[in-house]
Image (tube, rainbow, N blue to C red):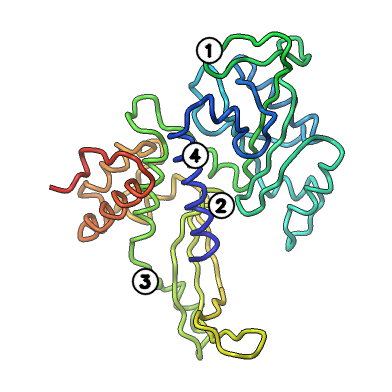
């Protein structure tokens, strides 16, 4: 299992945990980053607190988008997305280097933080800010009442990747949907993970540059970057002792990334459908079951993978995809 697949499954597991664990417990545990977190944030103060956190971290010039469920009155999980290219430019990171070492060095001494390169995200711990802009008492995550004489601490989760892509695919489900966004994303993962990965004419032209190699293709969904079409070949790998290893070495020769959610239809639909028209489990499933779906013979396989993923993560399988 490669990095992109691992990342995708980890991100979805985080969404699942967010759906399963009680709001109060998530706040108490600080989302796994900071045990000091003890407060919810009212919607009216959400932007003020995000901007305060970015300012404290020295990142107030960085454009951000609020992702996740934006319709709640109180927020425990505060998720925002920022663009990796803008971050690299701001931090003066060379194009061929990772942003994380430079980010860590930049944040040191400014704010309490945690960087998780494997998830392409970082976390900031700050005081809860009230209407006056000053630190405020904590707000109980369950009753939403003020906890007097207890300074509020909150956590901002910052996702780093393609901003437009994350704004769409990391968004919460539309209000009219009966299912959380994790259902939509599990279904999308099952679709992209099971569509044919035949080489296109463009792919074959690239493959000709490696006449002595067998070029293969994988199509991967990455909720930070987009849908990745990767061309690669395998070769024998050796350990430090020189002994051949069981698993081959994967050598990537080309990657094409689709980072606009409006272009997703091209992978599995015959005619265009914008993301806003399938930005829910119900609407995405409707497309899979429609005559517009490119691969009707793969429907049951896709839905089987979808059902299995839900079951493995202790999520109820919707009635409309139950096996009969």
Q: Is residue 18 left or right of residue 177?
A: right
Q: CA distance from mark 3 to mark 4?
A: 27 Å
Q: Secondary structure at mark 3?
A: loop
Query: Relative to residue 223, is residue 229 depicted above or below?
Result: below
Q: Which residue is mark 4?
A: 168
- Residue in the picture at 39% in, 46% down: 313
Q: Secondary structure at mark 2?
A: loop
Q: Secondary structure at mark 4?
A: helix
Q: Earlier in the sequence, mark 4 or mark 1?
A: 1
Q: Earlier in the sequence, mark 3 or mark 4?
A: 4
- Determine whether label 4 and label 1 are within 8 Å by CB: no
Expressed as whole percent of the image width and height from the top left, the position of residue 219 reads 44, 63
- Residue in the picture at 40% in, 71% down: 200
- Residue in the picture at 78% in, 14% down: 134
Q: Is residue 56 left or right of residue 122?
A: right
What is the number of the mark on residue 117? none
Q: Earlier in the sequence, mark 2 or mark 1?
A: 1
Crowd band around label 3 with a 10 angstrom C-alpha radius: few (<14), some (14–19), many (20+): few
Expressed as whole percent of the image width and height from the top left, the position of residue 12 reads 47, 46
Expressed as whole percent of the image width and height from the top left, the position of residue 165 reads 53, 44
- Residue in the picture at 80% in, 34% down: 111
Foreground residue, 122 or 252? 122
Q: CA distance from mark 3 to mark 1?
A: 54 Å
Q: Mark 2 or mark 1, which is nearer to you? A: 1
Q: Which residue is mark 3?
A: 198
Q: CA distance from mark 2 to mark 3?
A: 22 Å
Q: Mark 3 or mark 1, which is nearer to you? A: 1
Q: CA distance from mark 4 to mark 2?
A: 11 Å
What is the number of the mark on residue 143? 1
């Amino acid at each position: 299992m490669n990095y992109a697949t691992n990342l995708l499954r980890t991100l979805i597991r985080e969404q699942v945990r967010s759906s399963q664990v009680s709001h109060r417990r998530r706040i108490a545990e600080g989302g796994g980053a900071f045990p000091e977190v003890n407060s919810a944030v009212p919607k009216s103060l959400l932007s003020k607190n995000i901007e305060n956190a970015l300012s404290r971290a020295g990142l107030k010039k960085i454009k951000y988008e609020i992702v996740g469920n934006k319709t709640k009155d109180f927020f425990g999980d505060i998720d925002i997305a920022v663009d990796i290219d803008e971050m690299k430019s701001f931090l003066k990171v060379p194009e061929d280097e990772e942003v994380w070492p430079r980010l860590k060095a930049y944040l040191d001494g400014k704010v309490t933080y945690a960087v998780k390169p494997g998830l392409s995200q970082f976390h900031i711990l700050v005081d809860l800010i009230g209407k006056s802009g000053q630190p405020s008492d904590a707000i109980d995550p369950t009753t939403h009442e003020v906890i007097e004489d207890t300074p509020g601490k909150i956590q901002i989760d910052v996702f780093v990747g393609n901003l437009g892509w994350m704004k769409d695919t990391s968004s919460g489900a539309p209000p009219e949907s009966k299912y959380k966004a994790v259902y939509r994303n599990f279904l999308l993962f099952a679709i992209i993970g099971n569509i044919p990965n035949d080489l296109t004419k463009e792919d074959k032209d690239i493959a000709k540059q490696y006449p002595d190699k067998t070029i293969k293709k994988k199509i991967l969904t990455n909720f930070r970057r987009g849908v990745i079409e990767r061309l690669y070949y395998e070769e024998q790998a050796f350990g430090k002792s020189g002994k051949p290893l069981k698993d081959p070495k994967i050598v990537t020769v080309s990657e094409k990334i689709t980072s606009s959610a409006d272009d997703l239809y091209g992978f599995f639909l015959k005619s265009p459908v914008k993301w806003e028209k399938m930005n829910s489990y119900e609407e995405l499933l409707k497309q899979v079951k429609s005559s517009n779906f490119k691969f009707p013979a793969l429907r049951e396989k896709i839905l089987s993978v979808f059902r299995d993923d839900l079951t493995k993560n202790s999520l109820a399988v919707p009635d409309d995809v139950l096996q009969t």
